C-alpha cells in the first residue's frame, strides 16, 4: 500500500481566478493506517431523488414475479447490467387524502412531502430531501442541489424547505457549473469574462497547484485526479459548445445559452454535473427533474411528434401507449448512463453508487387517470451496504405510503426520522 508523503484534509480546495475546485476523496485524505482499519472507516452516504414526469405504461414497466427471480419488462431492460444495484418496488402510493381526485398539483405537492396541498395556496410540508439536508448538508458546501431540464411552470417543483417555501430548480448547466466551481459558490463575472476571453478552462486557473498536488500523492490518487479533472474539462467543453451554437431560426422559441438543443444531451450533461458534485463532496443531497409536472415536451429523437402531456392522456389507445412506452425506455436508458457513471468511480473499496441511495420514480402511475397509487419506483445504490439490490419487492395493494420508503431511506443514510407527511412507519424487506 502506498502511503502519501503528506495527508490532505477531506475538504481540500484548489483556488484560482474565479475558481474554487473541490477534490474527490483521495487515499491521501485518509490517515495512514492499516488496510483493515481503512476498510472499517465509515464511508460517506448520499441521498438522491430523480423524478420523471407523467407515469408509465404499466404493462411494459411492471416486472413479472417477485424476489431475486423476477423478470424485468422492456422499460427496465436498459438497466439489466446493473440489476444487482437496484430494487424495483411496487405497491407504494403518494395519495394522502384518498377522498380527493388525483391531479397534477396534488401529485407534485405530495410526491416528496406526503402532504395534501391546501387548495388555493402553497401549504404542504417539508420534503424528504430537505430533512436529509438539515443533517448531511452541514458537512458540504451545498446543503442540497435542485436541478431540472425545464422550468417548473405554474406548479412548484417537489422540493419544499418548509410548508410554504418550494425551492427553485436550475436548468442551465452553465449556471450550475459556475455555482459549483465559482469562488465561494457564486459567479464572478469579471473573472469569468477574463477566462472565457482567453478560451481557458476553469482548471487552467489552478493548473500549477494541480501539478504540485499530483507530485504529493500516490499512483492511485494521480489516476483518480486525472479522471476527475478530465470529467470537468469534458463538461466545460460541452457547455461551451452549447454556448457557441448559433441561435436557431425560431424567434418564438429562443434557446437559453448553455443549454443543449437535444433533450437527452441536456439530461446527460446535468447527470455529469451531478456526478462531479457528488464526487467532490460538494453536496450529499440532490434532486433532479427530467421535466416538469404536466410537461408538453416532445421527443423528435424518438420519432414522436405528440407532446408528452397529450400522450399521457392515452385513454388506453395503443398508439399513445406505444409512444409512452418508448419514452419510458429512453428515460431508463438515461438513468443507466448516470448509474454507470457513479458505479465506475471508486471510493475506497466500493463505488460512488454503492455509497449512495437514489430514488427514481414518477408522481403518477397511470397518467390518463392521474393515479398516484402503485407508483413506478426504483431504489438504486447500496447506502454503504445497507440495502440489498437485485430484487422486486411488492407491497400488497396500494395503501403503503411512499413516505414509509422515505423514512427507511433517511434511516439508511444516518438521518433517522419518526414521521414525514402521511407515513405510518419505515419499511422492511429492503435490507441485506
Image (cartoon, rainbow, N blue to C red):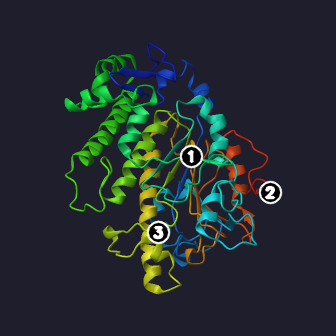
Residue topped by disc 3: 328
User: Disc 2 and disc 1: Cα gap in Å?
Assistant: 26 Å
Q: Secondary structure at mark 3?
A: helix
Q: Secondary structure at mark 1?
A: loop
Indicate which disc, 2 or 3, sits on the residue closer to the N terminus.
3
Up/down of 419 relative to 30, above or below: below
Q: Residues within 10 Å of mark 2 (few under 14, many from 20)?
A: some
Can the viewer see residue 89?
A: no
Residue topped by disc 2: 424
User: Disc 2 and disc 3: Cα gap in Å?
Assistant: 31 Å
- Residue 58: horizontal and vertical position, in percent? 56, 75
Mark in the foreground, 1 or 3: 1
The label shown at residue 75 is: none
Q: Is residue 277 left or right of residue 383?
A: left
Up/down of 429 relative to 21, above or below: below
Q: Residue 341 versus residue 410: which sits nearer the camera?
A: 410
Up/down of 331 relative to 139, above or below: below
Q: Is residue 391 left or right of residue 428?
A: left
Q: Residue at x 20, y 31 (%)?
A: 197
Q: Residue 136 versus residue 10: which sits nearer the camera?
A: 136
Q: Is residue 1 left or right of residue 226?
A: right
Q: Residue 351 versus residue 282: which sits nearer the camera?
A: 282
Mark in the foreground, 2 or 1: 1
Q: Residue at x 30, y 48 (%)?
A: 257
Residue topped by disc 1: 167
Amino acid at each position: 500500500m502506498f502511503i502519501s508523503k503528506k495527508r490532505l484534509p477531506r475538504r481540500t480546495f484548489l483556488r484560482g481566478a474565479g475558481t474554487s475546485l473541490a477534490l474527490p476523496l483521495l487515499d491521501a485524505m485518509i490517515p495512514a493506517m492499516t488496510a483493515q482499519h481503512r476498510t472499517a472507516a465509515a464511508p460517506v452516504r448520499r441521498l438522491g431523488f430523480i423524478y420523471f414526469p407523467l407515469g408509465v405504461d404499466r404493462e411494459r414497466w411492471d416486472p413479472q414475479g417477485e424476489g431475486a427471480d423476477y423478470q424485468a419488462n422492456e422499460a427496465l431492460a436498459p438497466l439489466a447490467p446493473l440489476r444487482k444495484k437496484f430494487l424495483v418496488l411496487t405497491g407504494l402510493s403518494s395519495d394522502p387524502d384518498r377522498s380527493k381526485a388525483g391531479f397534477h398539483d396534488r401529485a407534485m405537492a405530495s410526491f416528496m412531502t406526503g402532504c395534501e396541498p391546501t387548495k388555493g395556496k402553497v401549504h404542504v410540508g417539508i420534503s424528504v430531501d430537505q430533512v436529509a439536508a438539515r443533517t448531511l448538508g452541514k458537512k458540504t458546501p451545498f446543503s442540497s442541489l435542485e436541478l431540472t431540464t425545464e422550468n417548473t411552470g405554474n406548479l412548484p417543483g417537489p422540493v419544499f424547505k418548509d410548508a410554504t417555501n418550494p425551492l427553485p430548480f436550475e436548468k442551465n448547466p452553465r449556471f450550475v457549473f459556475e455555482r459549483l466551481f465559482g469562488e465561494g459558490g457564486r459567479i464572478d463575472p469579471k473573472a469569468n469574462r477574463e477566462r472565457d476571453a482567453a478560451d481557458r478552462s476553469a482548471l487552467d486557473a489552478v493548473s500549477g497547484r494541480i501539478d504540485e498536488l499530483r507530485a504529493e500523492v500516490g499512483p492511485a490518487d494521480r489516476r483518480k485526479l486525472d479522471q476527475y479533472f478530465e470529467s470537468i474539462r469534458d463538461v466545460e467543453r460541452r457547455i461551451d459548445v452549447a454556448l457557441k451554437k448559433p441561435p436557431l431560426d425560431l424567434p418564438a422559441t429562443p434557446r437559453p445559452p448553455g443549454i443543449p438543443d437535444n433533450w437527452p444531451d441536456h439530461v446527460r450533461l446535468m447527470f455529469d454535473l451531478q456526478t462531479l458534485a457528488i464526487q467532490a463532496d460538494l453536496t450529499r443531497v440532490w434532486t433532479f427533474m427530467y421535466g416538469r409536472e404536466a410537461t408538453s415536451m416532445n421527443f423528435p429523437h424518438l420519432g414522436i411528434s405528440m407532446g408528452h402531456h397529450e400522450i399521457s392522456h392515452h385513454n388506453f389507445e395503443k398508439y399513445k401507449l406505444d409512444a409512452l412506452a418508448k419514452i419510458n425506455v429512453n428515460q431508463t436508458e438515461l438513468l443507466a448512463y448516470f448509474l454507470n457513471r457513479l458505479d465506475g468511480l471508486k471510493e475506497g473499496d466500493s463505488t460512488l453508487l454503492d455509497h449512495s441511495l437514489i430514488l427514481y420514480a414518477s408522481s403518477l402511475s397511470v397518467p390518463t387517470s392521474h393515479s398516484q397509487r402503485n407508483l413506478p419506483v426504483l431504489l438504486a445504490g447500496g447506502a454503504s451496504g445497507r440495502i440489498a439490490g437485485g430484487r422486486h419487492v411488492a407491497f400488497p395493494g396500494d395503501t403503503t405510503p411512499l413516505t414509509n420508503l422515505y423514512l427507511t431511506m433517511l434511516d439508511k443514510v444516518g438521518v433517522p426520522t419518526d414521521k414525514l407527511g402521511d407515513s405510518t412507519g419505515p419499511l422492511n424487506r429492503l435490507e441485506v
